[in-house]
Image (cartoon, helix red, strand yellow):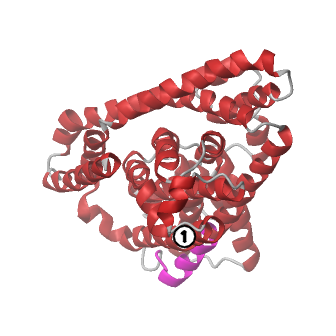
Amino acid sequence: MKKLQLTTKIFIGLILGIIIGLLLQGNPQIAATYISPFGTLFLNMIKMIIVPLVFSSLIVGAASVGDPKSLGRIGGKTIAYFLVTTAFAVVIGLILGFVLQPGSGLSIPVDVSQEAAEVPSIVKTLLDIIPANPLKGLVDGNILQVIAFALFLGVSCTLIPQEKSAPFIKFFDSLAEVMYKVTAIVMSFAPIGVFALIVPVVSNHGLDVLKPLSILIFAVYLGCILHALITYSTAVKIFANMSPMTFFKGIAPAAITAFSTSSSSGTLPITISCSKENLGVTDKIASFVLPLGATINMDGTALYQGVCALFIAQVYGIELTIAQIFIIILTATLGSIGTAGVPGAGLIMLTLVLQSVGLPLEGLVLVAGVDRILDMARTCVNVVGDASCAVLVTATEKELVEEEAKSKN
C-alpha cells in the first residue's frame, strides 16, 4: 500500500506540474527561478547515488551468480533480449513514420544549418568500455567503465577461494544495502522533484510550440505505447507467466520518474527497487541486468531515431531505399549501446543514424526544438524495457520470487 501511495503522489505531482506549467507560459522565468531549483536538487540527489549503487550492486550481483558459466548464461539472455526488443522498436518507429508521415507539409528555414556533433564510432565505444584507469572511470561517472570494472571484480571473486573473497563481497553487499536505504530516502522527495522538473518544460514549450511538430510527437508517443503494450506485455506473459497489468503496475513509480527526469541512469535506483519489491526479481539478477540495461538498452531511443529519420527524410523530400531502411534498423540498434542514459543523449546519437544513410544533419534543428518532450517518452520506455528483461531472465532462471508468482494468478 505504501508503494501505491508513492505512485499516486508522483502522478499527482506530474499532473500539477503540467497545470502550473501551462499557467506560467507567459512567465517561464518564474518557473526557472523559483521552481526549477527543486528539480535540480532532486536530480543531484539521484546522481549522487548512481555510481556507488551500480558499482556495489554489480559486484555483488556478478559474485552471487556462483560461477562464470551461469553469469555467461544470464548475460547472454540479457544481451539477446535487449538487441531483439531494440530492433522491434526501430521497426515500429519506421512503420509509424511511413503511416503517419510526420514530415509531410513541413519545411526547414532556408538559412538554417547546424554542424553535427562528433559521435564516437561503434569500435571506439566498445574499446572505451574497458577503462585504462578504473578509478578515473568511477570519478567521472562513466557508467560503461564502472560496469566493466565491477564485472571483472565480481567474476574474479568466483574464481578464488571463498575464504579470500568473502570479506570483499561482504563489504560491497553492505554498501549496496546502505545505498538501497539512501534510495528510499531520496524517493520520498520524488513527488516534489517530478513537479519541479515538469513545470519548466511545459512553461517553456507550451501547447503552441508543439503544434508544428504535433504529428512527430504523436508518432513517437504512440510508438512507445505500442512497443510497451505489445513487446513487453508479450514477453512477461509468455516467458514469466506474469499478467501485463501486474507488471505495469509494479514498474509504474520508475516509469513516471523516468518520464519526468529523462534519465535511465538517474532512474536506476527506483527501477531496482520496483523490480525487486513489486515484480519478484531476485537481488543477483536485478543487480546485474538493470544497471546493464540502463546503459545499453535504449528501445525508446531507437524507436525515436527511426521515427525522426523518416521525419527528416520527408521534410527534405528524400525517399529512402530498402537498403537504407535496413541500415537505419542496424545503426539504431547498435548505436543504442553507446547512448548514455542521460537527458538529451538520444539527439546526439541521432546524428549517427542520419549520417549512416546520408540524410541532412540540418534536420536536427527541427527535432531539437521538441527533443525534451520526446526524451521523456523514450526514456520511460527504456526503463520499462529494463524491468521486463529482469523479469524474463529471473523467470527463465526459475528464480522468480514465490510470493510474486502467487500474486499473478
Q: Is residue 355 visible?
A: no
- Residue 55 lies, in percent from the top left, at 62, 28
- What residue is disc 1 on? 233
- Amino acid at the residue labelled 1: Ser
Which residue is found at the position 59% from the left and 20% from the top? 139
Q: Is residue 27 visible?
A: yes
The majority secondary structure of the magenta stretch comes to helix
| Residue nearest the viewer, comparing 285 with 53 | 285
Which residue is found at the position 72% from the left and 54% from the top? 397
| Residue nearest the viewer, comparing 26 with 114 | 26
**Left or right of 210 in this view: 96:** right
- Residue 304 lies, in percent from the top left, at 53, 63
| Above/below status of 137 relative to 296 | above
- Badge 1: how crowded within 10 Å, few (<14), some, or many (20+)? some
**Residue 388 on the magenta segment:** no
Which residue is found at the position 66% from the left and 67% from the top? 239
Which residue is found at the position 66% from the left and 60% from the top? 332
Magenta residues, as a range? Answer: 89-102
